[in-house]
Image (cartoon, grey):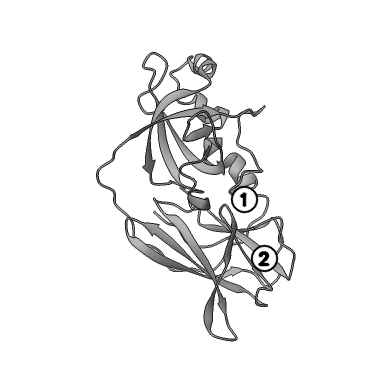
Amino acid sequence: MGLCQYYLLSVVLLLPALCYSQYTFTSSRATYYGSPDGLGTPTGACGFGAYGRTVNDANVAGVSRLWNNGTGCGACYQVRCNVPEVCTDYGVYVVVTDYGEGDDTDFVLSPRAYGRMALADKAEELYTFGVVDVEFLRVPCRFRGYNVMFKVHENSKYPQYLAVATLYVGGQNDVLAVEMWQEDCKEWMPMKRAFGAVFDIFYPPPGPMNLRFQVSGSAGLTWVVANNAIPKVWKAGVAYESAIQLA
C-alpha cells in the first residue's frame, strides 16, 4: 500500500458516487521545488508523512491560495502549462500534500509533476523556465485499489494523545471535520484540526475507536462512519485501513 504497516478493518458506510458537469480552467502560474529524487517531501504541511512523498506516483503539489486552512490537503487538480512548443495538452494530475508559496503561483509542484507537463524530450527545457503560466482544474481524486486509511501521526503518544490524518479520500471531497464516538456518554466528540489534514484529541477513549469524518463535495455535506477505525492498542506512524472507498 506504499506505507510500512496497515490493518484491514470492518465494513463501514459508503458515500454515493458523485457526478460532475461543466469544467472551467483557471489561469495561474506554477513552479517546482528542489528534490534530489524528484519525489514529494515527507515533511509536508498536510501531515501526510511518507504518503505525501509517494502518493500518485509522486505527482504532488504544495498550494497557498488553495490551502483553505488545511482543508485543501488531499485535493486533486489537473495542471497544464501554456507553452505550446514545450507543453502537452493534458498536463499533469496532482495531489495536494503540502503548503507552498512561489512567485505569484498557485502550485509548487514536485520536480516529477512539473516535468510531466512537458512534451517528450522537453522536460529539461521546461525546467529552465522555473516559473510557467498554467491553467488548473479541480478534478476527482482516483485511488484505484486503495481504501480510505486513517494514519496515526508520528507525534501521537499512546495512550494520552492521538492525532490522525485521513488518506486516500477519493472523489472531489474535502474533509471538514473528524469526530470520535464517546461510548460512556453516547455521543460524538469533535476532534480539533491540529494542522493541515491532521485532527487530534487528548485522552481518547479506551478500546477500539469509531470515527466519522464530514466531507463536502457535489453530494453536499456527508458524514462517513468508520467503525473500529483505530484499534485498542494503536501505534504512532501506522496507517489503519478501512473498507471505505469514496468516488
Q: Are marks 2 and 1 in contact (CB under 8 Å)?
A: no
Image quadrant assignment for residue 101 = top right
Say which of 104 and 226 sits in front.
104
Residue 122 vs 10, above or below: the answer is above
Question: For the residue marked with disc 2, what is the amino acid?
Answer: Leu
Number of labelled discs?
Answer: 2
Using a 10 Å C-alpha cutoff, classify the residue at mark 1 as few (fewer than 14 neighbours), some (14 to 19) or many (20 or more): many
Give the residue type at disc 1: Gly
Q: Residue 162 carries which label?
A: 2
Q: Which residue is drawn at 74% across and 67% down?
A: 158
In the displayed structure, 69 sits above or below 8; it is: above
Q: Position of residue 184 (x, y in %)?
A: 60, 86
For this orientation, the residue located farthest to the left is 22
Residue in the foreground of this view, choosing between 137 and 147:
137
Name the residue rendered at 43%, 18% in the picture: 119
Q: Which mark identifies residue 106?
A: none
Q: Residues within 10 Å of mark 2 (few under 14, many from 20)?
A: many
Query: Which residue corresponds to mark 1?
Result: 47
Q: Name which of mark 2 and mark 1 comes first in the sequence.
A: 1
Where disc 1 sits, the SS reads loop
Q: Rounded to the nearest whole Å, what is the CA distance between mark 2 and mark 1?
A: 14 Å
- On the image, the x and y values in percent for residue 236 come to 71, 59
Q: What element carries label 2?
A: strand
Q: Which residue is drawn at 61% across and 60% down?
A: 164
Q: Classify residue 110 as left or right of residue 12.
A: right
Percent coordinates x, y for residue 232 in the rendering:
67, 73
The image position of residue 210, as x and y in percent, is 56, 73
Q: Which residue lies furthest to the front in this view?
A: 104
Residue at the far bottom: name it: 185
Residue 200 vs residue 140, the one in the foreground: 200
